[in-house]
Structure formats: C-alpha cells, structure tokens
Amino acid sequence: RSQTVFLGGLSLLSLAFIFGTPLYALLYYGLPFINQLHTPFRWVFPLSLCVAVLAGFGGDYLGQQGLEIGDWRLGTRSKSLISNLQSLFFLRAKPTFVTFFAALLVWGGSAALLGLAGSWVVYGRLQPLIERVLLSMALAADAFPNAQAFYSYLFPQFLQLGVVVIGCGVVLRVSQGKNGRFFPHLAALLLILDLFLINRGFHAAVDPALLSYEPPLVHWLRQQPGPWRLTTFDSQGQKPLNANAGWLFGFEDVRGYDSIIPKQFANYMAAIEPQNELLFNRIQPVANWESLNSPLLDVLNVKYIITQETVELPKLQQVWQEGNLRVYENLAVAPRAYTLPQTQTAVVPDPLTAMTTQYDPRNYVVVERGEWSGEGNSLLPTPHSPLPYTPATITSYRNIEVWVDTAVNEPSWLILNDSYAPGWKAFLRPFGGEEADEREVEIIRVNGNFRGILLDEPGQWTVRYRYSPRSFQLGGLISFMGAILLAFGFIVGGWRRYVRSDGQLSATHSVIKNSGAPMLLNLFNKLIDFAFAAFYLRLLGPADAGSYSFAIATAIIFEILSNFGLNILIVRDVAQAKDRASSYLLNTTVLRLFTSGVALLPVIAFVIGSRFFANPISNPELLALALIIIGMLFSGMSQGVTGLFYVFEQAEIPAAMTTVTTLLKVGFGVLVLLLGFGFVGLAAVSIVVNLITLAVLGRLAFGRFPLSGPWRVDWSLQRQMVGKGFPLMLIHLLQTVFISVDVVILRFLNGSEVVGWYNSAYKWFNALQIVPSFFTLALFPIISRAIHENMATAQRMYR
C-alpha cells in the first residue's frame, strides 16, 4: 500500500510539473540549476514509470480476484426494472469498484464514439465552434490552415481513444467473471494494440544514404583551415543551417539546442544580444545586425556567418553564395589562442559589462575580481592604451586535450578561446621539453568565458590543456566500487552455498579452503586499493601521496615491533591446544600494549634523527604518522583475534572482513579527501576503520569459538611469549626492512614526490606477495598441530 501511495503521488506531481502548474515553481526556484532546464515535459519519464508499475500492481490484484457473475442476470423474473438496469449498467457483473470502473469505461467510450459520429453528420453546424476552439489554442492556428484541417486531424485520434477506452472496460469486466483466466492475455493484446495505434507512422523510414550527402555549403566550409566557429544571421526566422545541424559535419557552432546549457556561456551570448530562445533550450542565431559588430563575437572565434540576407558591414566580406544562401567571413575574428602582456590586465567586478563598455577583449585581458590570486599585485598597473594580441599556434586540438606553442618577451597571458570549466588543467613546459619538465599552472577564467594562464617568464613555451574533472574520477571510482560490491556478494554467497566447514575436511582440503579464500579476497582487495590509489594520487598529487606512503612505511616498523611475533605465536600454540585460546588472546593483547610503548622509542628516535637530513619529516607527515600508529594499535589487537580464525580453520571470515574493511577505508577516504583533509585525513580514517574491524571480529570470535576462560593475566606465559616471539619478530622485521627501506631512503634523498611515483608502481609488486604468504599462513596451524602429535607425519606433510 505504501508503494502504491508513493507511486500515485509521484504520478500526480509529474503531471503537475508537465503541464506547468504553479507546483513547478518549487523546482524551478527551489533547486539549484533547475532554472536552466526548460524541459518540464521530461517528467513524462517518471510518470510513465509510475503508471507502468501501478498497472502491474493492478494487474496482479485483478488476477487474484476472479469474482463470479452470481445472480446478476438481465431479464430474470425476480428482478425489478431498476435491478435489470443496474445489471445492464454493470455489464451483468456483481457491483464492485472494479466493475463500476469497467462500466464507466465501456459506456463512456461508447458515448464518445456516438458523439464523434454525430459530429461528423452535423459538421456544418459545429464548424464555427470548432473554429473558435482552434483560434483559442496557443499557436494552433500556425499549425492548421483552417477548422476543417484541425477537425480532420483530431477525428482519428478521438476514434482511437474511444476504441481503446472501450477495450479497457471489456478487459476489466472479463477479469471479474468466469473467464478471468483470459484477463492477462487480453490485457497484453490491448496494450499491443494501443502501442501500435500510437506509434503507427511515427517512426518514419529514411534512406541512410542521406547521411553521406554533402551539401555545397558543407563542402566549401570543410575546405577552410581552422580552427574556427560559425553562427547564422537570421532576422526573419528563416533558420539557415539550423542549430545542431552543423555538428553532423564536425563544425563548431556557437548556437545550440540542448536541455542543459552552461549559464556562463548563456550569459556571454546574452552580452552580445538578448537570448530570447532560452525558454526553448536554444542559443539563438544573431538577429540584429548591430550584434555582428560586437567584439565578443570576434574573440569567440566566430569566423563565418551564414545567412539568407544581405549584410553590409566593413568587418564582413562575402566569400561564398549559392542562390539566396550566403557566407560572410569575419575579418576581425580573433584566433583560437593568443597572448597579451600582463600589463593589459583589467580586474573588474563584471567582466561582461566591462567588455561591452570599456575594455575591448581583443586588446585587454578582463578578469573578474576575486578569481585571480595575482590581482592584488601592487606592481600591476591599470591598463590604459590598447595593445594588439599575438597569435599562438595550436599544434593539437581534441575534445579533452589541447596543445599550444607560443613565445613571449615579457610576462603575458595565454588565452585559449574555449569555455572555462573547473575540470580543465594546464601544464607548462619549455618549448621542445619533455613531460618531466612540465609543471601545472592555474587556469583563470578571463573575458567572462575563456581559459587564461599566466606565463610569468619570457621565452618559448608549450602548454598542454587536459580535461580531467574530479567528478569523472569520483564517478569512475563509485562505479568500480559498485561492481566490486556485486562481485563480493556473489563470492560470499557462492562460498556459503558450496563450501561448508563441518570439521571433517582433510588436511589438503583445509589448506585449500583456508588459503584460497584469503588469497582470492586479498587479490580482490588489491584491485580496490589500486583504484583508490589512482583516485587519491590524482587528488593529492605525487608529493602528498608520497608523504602518505612514507608515513605508512615508517609506521610499519612500529607495527612489527609492537606485534613482536605474537600473530604467528598465537596461531602456532593455540593450534596445538585450542582450550588455551582465551588465555592466549588476553595475554597477547596485554603484552601488545607493553610492546607498543617500547616500539614507540625507536620511532621517536627516527623522527628526531630525520631533522639532520636535507629533507626532514614535515609536520603533516608527523601528524599522519602518529594517527597511523594509533590505528595500528587497534589493528594489532584485531590480528590477534584473526589468529583464532586460522586456528579453528575459518580463515575465510577474516578474509571477507578485510574486504569489508577495505571498502570502508575507501568510502571514508573519499569523504575526507573531498572535504579537503588530505593525506592526514586518510591517516585518521585508519583509526576508525581498525576500530570497526576489531569490534566485528571480536563479536564473531566470541560467538563462534569456545572462549569461556579462564580470563586472567599470566605473567609467566607472557615471559615465555617474549622469548618465543623475539625470533619471529626479528624475521618479520628483517623481511619488512628489506622490502620497505627503499621508500624511506628515497624520501630523504629525493623528497616525497619521487616516493609518490615510485610507490604507485610498487603496488603491483606487493600484490604478488599475497599468494605465498597466505598459503603459508593457512598451512601453519596444521603443521604445528602435526608436529605436536606426530613428527613423522609433520615431516611428510612438509615435504
């Protein structure tokens, strides 16, 4: 019922929005950007969805009713006239809401058909009324030459409507009788008939050869060197080369017909002349000849104006004509890319007004106040005399990447006359340089719409513009995570269905189960890590990503010293005597707290010693290191709990939890990055995620394993653990130092940026370490138990 109410309410709202009732104002003025969507008719899509779902609900309901006709029969002696009329009205069915609605449809549709037939018979008398209706409808008189054409068009529409309405009533009536089993089939046939009547002749067949036809105008335009843009001059509504038609041939048209038009561009075009077609989702052609003189049209790189009219302006020269169709070349057009000295900068509150009243954008760079960090430069003079621009050379031009070469003799602006958007980035390198010589430079919105960068030194330069919006990266990551979640769900579901831990598995099967799941899921986790690393590397940049990697590599030393081999020790010893699980879990946790305090000492010494290097540890790196260490304290405790799952040969559970942890890390990580907390925020995320992991694994362990006690601190046992754990810790430490010391060395020798690039590539190598480590960990409790029970069996198993 709640779904029906929701869908019914949404249907009514959609209808209200479609027909432009005052309710649409709630969207138009209440939600951001909706005032740029002049398309209320698109609410027909949610309306169609709601109606389809509600129809499905209704079909299910009717299919379950199957009411019998009963005694409601016409002409029965015991019935009065009123009863007979009632039976006739209800189509000889028992009076219910459904049969009442069916009767209304049948009799209403029949009345409509009779009325339609009557109108045809007495059309002469009705013609004045039909004509008044035609004239009262907005723009209807433009579509129909007279009342007879209007009537002829509507007659078959109402005829089809009447037939379908009667059909709906008949189908509803059948659903309530003895033949109710035929209801779904009749409903499907009626739906097919309705769709056929609606769409018959709508999808016209067109010869695809028309797409290969090249009109003479298009042929001529394609021969002109670019890049350039075009528009049309149309003061009489003749619509030569209508908007969007040029896109078929690859032309860049400043007009357009689209549901979403950037406000920035719409405002720019409105500064040339009022945009009266925005309500129809259009950037209009130039309608006033005075607008053709606008310098804003020149810097928009509009080189050709197509028209069916004669235009006499000094800046326009006719270059092509066929019949009444003419093409004028704009002799004052600005190139797509050019430079102007920095001294020609004008910082103003309203660039569009300033460009139409004071500063010609061909001679000045107009910047809106507050958009450029250099606007407060006291050495920046107020521009006074115009200077001509110097064209720059575009060497490559694609939708998402543009290359420009230029040479300047003083600090200058390079202006690319393409629309500014936040997703664009610019990279500057010396002319002839390599990618390693690039540095990113800020793109400023200049002249109200375009992309400008400041070349702060004289010389020859190459600029690479690249479109790489954060929203696209985030969307890609979200889509990838969605696919990962689906795959994870299938893996967990399949594992629970086909792999059962009933305590009867052989040693071989146990190793396969307890190594296969962790290996598969951890490879899965690495895929997630790669995607997230690609995201945060782009967001943070190589330097901050390198600082984050360095903080992790340093904290790993703390983790190894604080764990002190206890992760392996609890698996080895408890596998031999599972009744000691409670005691080992408590005492390893207490011992970790002590070893963590000891492990802090070398880390503190390392931090102090780094002050004597050329690249000491920065304050953000130090804060990130402290947060990661706190997170690793909880991580160490959860690893102790994880060891119990290996002891009881249920390694798939902590492996699955690791995947959940990775997903949480990515989710929280994206949030803190978007909030601007950087790699320090990522470090803080580790605390939250490790706390959640510890809580969940602890809850699962206490619910699955015999951990009833005794719960007491055994100092003797802890002394034994220190002696047994030291060699295990030392082996782990040496292995880790061998693998991770390169990050520390690179950090102090070459800085964080090099570490960022290096660690991104190194992740692929780390992924390969999963297979042997998890296979060994799965085998470890089985061999340990075999050594305790029978050495010969253990030796044979090892071989």
Image (cartoon, rainbow, N blue to C red):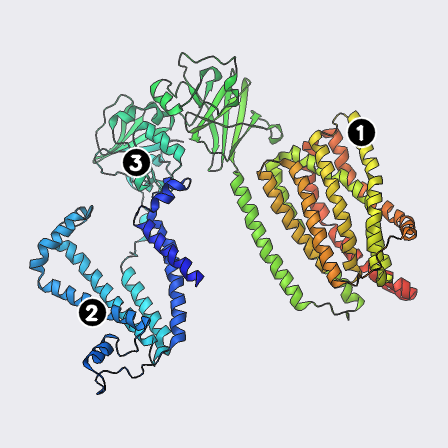
Residue 588 in sight: yes
- SS under mark 3: loop
Q: Position of residue 215 (x, y in %)?
A: 29, 41
User: Do the residues under discs 2 and 3 have CB atoms within 8 angstroms?
Assistant: no
> Which of pointers 2 and 3 lies earlier in the amino acid sequence?
2
Residue 66 rendering spot, x and y as whole percentages:
37, 78
For disc 1, the marked residue is 608
Query: Label 2, label 3: how many angstroms apart (C-alpha)?
Result: 48 Å
Task: Give the residue type at disc 1.
Answer: Ile
Sequence order check: which comes first, mark 1 or mark 3?
3
Amino acid type for the residue under numbered disc 3 = Gln
Sooner in the amino-acid sequence: mark 2 or mark 1: 2
> Which quarter of the figure has residue 535?
top right
Q: Which residue: 41% across, 40% down? A: 33
Quadrant of res 760: top right
The residue sitting at 68% across, 35% down in the picture is 546
Q: Secondary structure at mark 2?
A: helix
Using the image, determine if residue 399 lies above or below residue 292: below
Camera-nearest label, 1 or 3: 1
Q: Residue at x 45, y 13 (%)?
A: 382
Q: Quadrant of the C terminus?
A: bottom right
Q: Position of residue 477 (x, y in %)?
A: 57, 46
Q: Is residue 563 left or right of residue 133?
A: right
**Residue labelled with disc 3:** 284
Query: Is residue 550 at least partly visible in the picture?
Result: no
Circle 2 residue: 110
